[in-house]
Image (cartoon, helix red, strand yellow):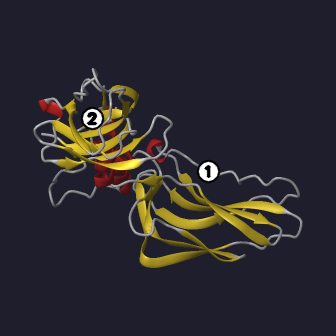
């Protein structure tokens, strides 16, 4: 039976060193969760230098919780064996981690694993992917597939997962939260005077503290040219803009012809008004966005 091993603890200065790379890797693996390339620097971007050389630029690589990096501004050139006329091959550029065991010697390299040459469709070479946390000794993480047709490299395909930083994750989660908080709003929610104006299309919604009004409405009432209509909307208090906000409104006739722009404003007091230039323009297309409390 084992015992709990402290890692981030202080011990007697005279005690034997007992923290190994495997201990740190276990922590990192529990945080990162997968092999990949961190989203920093040039993220190990590839560049074909010639039909015998693919360059991998700077970046930070993680394999089984073990980190390595190509320093900023530096690169590694990976040598590709010559192709053969009329034959196809897939080579894989890998990050390879080898250990002799807990507390032993580790090696971390960038290598090219050569695939089999064939006249048919090329297949990838087999990779060794031991679970290092479970005492595996070798793990090869694919970075790029180098596709060779005849004598030429025809393409280099990314195979690794890009691992975002914590700030990137926070931004993504905030955007995701806004999406899940999205609330669709009906014309009635936004205070449309449905006794006069009818809805054809509505895609209005609230996300966070932002209202998105997107609506097509029409009326059978007589339109007076250049008249300011301030009775179409009375926006409820919870959806009113913080400040008076310009609104995009286009008016057209019943056949969706002769479009004209309208002067329009959504006011902080809840009044959304517009001025329709022509008497024949009884169809309105409204698109607006504003912040609320």
Quadrant in which the C terminus is drawn: top left
Residue at image position (49%, 67%) is 44
Q: Which residue occupies 29% across, 24% down?
A: 196
Q: Report whether 23 appears left or right of 160.
A: left
* Residue 62 visible in this rendered orientation of the protein: no
Residue at 21%, 40% (x, y): give it: 273
Residue 110 position, x and y percent, is 55, 67
In the depicted structure, whether residue 52 falls above or below residue 191: below
Q: Identify the element where label 1 is drawn.
A: loop
Q: Position of residue 114 (x, y in %)?
A: 72, 62
Q: Residues within 10 Å of mark 2 (few under 14, many from 20)?
A: many
Q: In the rendered structure, which disc, 1 or 2, sits on the residue that comes first in sequence? A: 1
Local crowd size for mark 1, using a 10 Å CA cut-off: few (<14), some (14–19), many (≥20): few
**Residue 222 shows in this picture:** yes
Quadrant of the rendered structure where residue 119 is? bottom right
Q: Is residue 155 left or right of residue 244?
A: right
Q: On the picture, is 7 further left or further right than 62?
A: left
Q: Residue furthest left?
A: 269
Residue 289 is drawn in which quadrant? Answer: top left
70 to the left or right of 116: left
User: 6 and 293: which one is in front?
Assistant: 293
Q: Nearer the viewer, residue 146 or 183?
A: 183
Q: Which residue is mark 2?
A: 206
Labelled pair 1, 2 in contact (Cβ < 8 Å): no
Picture quarter containing residue 288?
top left
Q: Considering only vertical position in the picture, is 15 above or below 31?
A: below
User: Which label sits on residue 128?
Assistant: 1
Who's the residue at 47% across and 51% down the image? Answer: 35
> Number of callouts in the render?
2
């Amino acid at each position: 039976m084992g015992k709990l091993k402290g890692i981030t603890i202080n011990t007697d200065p005279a005690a034997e060193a007992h923290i190994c790379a495997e201990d740190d890797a276990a922590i990192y693996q529990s945080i990162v969760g997968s092999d990949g390339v961190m989203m920093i620097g040039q993220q190990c971007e590839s560049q074909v230098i010639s039909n015998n050389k693919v360059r991998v630029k700077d970046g930070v690589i993680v394999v089984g919780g073990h980190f390595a990096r190509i320093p900023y501004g530096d690169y590694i050139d990976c040598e590709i064996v010559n192709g053969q006329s009329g034959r196809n091959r897939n080579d894989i550029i890998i990050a390879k981690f080898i250990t002799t065991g807990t507390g032993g010697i580790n090696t971390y390299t960038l290598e090219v694993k050569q695939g089999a040459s064939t006249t048919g469709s090329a297949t990838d070479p087999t990779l060794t992917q031991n679970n290092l946390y479970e005492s595996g000794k070798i793990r090869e993480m694919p970075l790029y597939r180098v596709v060779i047709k005849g004598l030429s490299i025809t393409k280099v395909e990314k195979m690794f997962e890009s691992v975002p930083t914590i700030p990137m994750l926070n931004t993504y989660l905030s955007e995701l939260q806004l999406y899940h908080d999205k609330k669709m709003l009906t014309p009635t929610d936004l205070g449309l005077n449905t006794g006069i104006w009818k809805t054809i299309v509505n895609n209005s919604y609230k996300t966070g503290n932002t209202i998105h009004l997107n609506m097509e409405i029409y009326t059978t009432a007589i339109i007076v040219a250049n008249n300011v209509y301030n009775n179409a909307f009375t926006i409820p208090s919870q959806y009113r803009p913080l400040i008076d906000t310009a609104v995009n409104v286009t008016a057209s006739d019943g056949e969706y012809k002769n479009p004209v722009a309208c002067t329009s404003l959504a006011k902080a007091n809840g009044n959304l008004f517009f001025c329709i230039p022509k008497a024949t323009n009884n169809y309105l297309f409204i698109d607006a966005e504003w912040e609320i409390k």
